[in-house]
Amino acid sequence: MVLDLLPWLNKLPIIIFPFVFTILTLILSLKNFEYISWSILGIGSLSVGLSHGDLDHLTQNKIISKKQLFYFVANYLLKGALFAVVWFIVPYIALIIFILYSAWHFGQADFKEWGHNQGWLSFV
């Protein structure tokens, strides 16, 4: 039965999936099954999120030595740890900052890839 759904799922626009996940998360929260939502979020972060982060060094200045790579990775991990502390202390503000930064970061990477200037439009 699941295999019958796969061709149908491939035809849906990719934008549908975040909305479906949001609705599913809200339903699970109403039924007190938040741990399922957190598990899915954790798996997504550890798989898609980390692999996206692994490519950030390619969008920055060219890293040509192991020393530069070490500093880049150390800086990346330090920023992540500091943001985790902020998230723990003021989660709502951290969420807003995270969403705004993510919008800018993805737009910046796309604009660089497409050869456009990276101004305020990359945020939008």
Image (cartoon, rainbow, N blue to C red):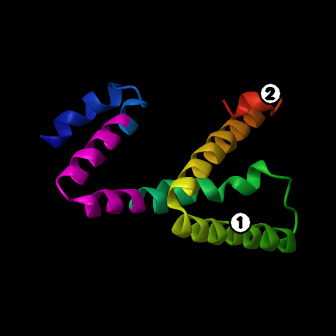
Left or right: residue 67 compared with residue 101: right
- The magenta segment is 19-42
Nearest to N terminus: mark 1 or mark 2: 1
Report which residue position mark 2 lands on: 116
Q: Main secondary structure of the magenta part?
A: helix
Vertical placement of residue 77 versus 47, above or below:
below
Residue sitting farthest toward the left: 1
Q: Residue at x 37, y 30 (%)?
A: 16
**In this view of the protein, which residue sits in the foreground, 56 or 34?**
34
Q: Amino acid at mark 1?
A: Tyr
Which quarter of the picture shows residue 107? top right
Residue 36 appears at what percent x and percent y? Answer: 26, 60
| Mark 1 to mark 2 CA distance (whole Å) | 25 Å
* Label 2: element kind: loop
Residue 54 appears at what percent x and percent y? Answer: 64, 59
Left or right: residue 32 compared with residue 68: left
Q: Is residue 75 magenta?
A: no
Report which residue position mark 1 lands on: 76
Left or right: residue 70 compared with residue 22: right
* Label 1: element kind: helix
Q: Residue at x 39, y 38 (%)?
A: 18
Which quarter of the picture shows residue 106? top right
**In this view of the protein, which residue sits in the foreground, 50 or 124?**
124
Residue 104 appears at what percent x and percent y? Answer: 68, 40
**Is the residue marked by circle 2 packed among few (<14), some (14-19), or many (20+) residues within 10 Å?**
few
Vertical placement of residue 23 versus 93, above or below:
above
**In this view of the protein, which residue sits in the foreground, 115 or 81?**
81
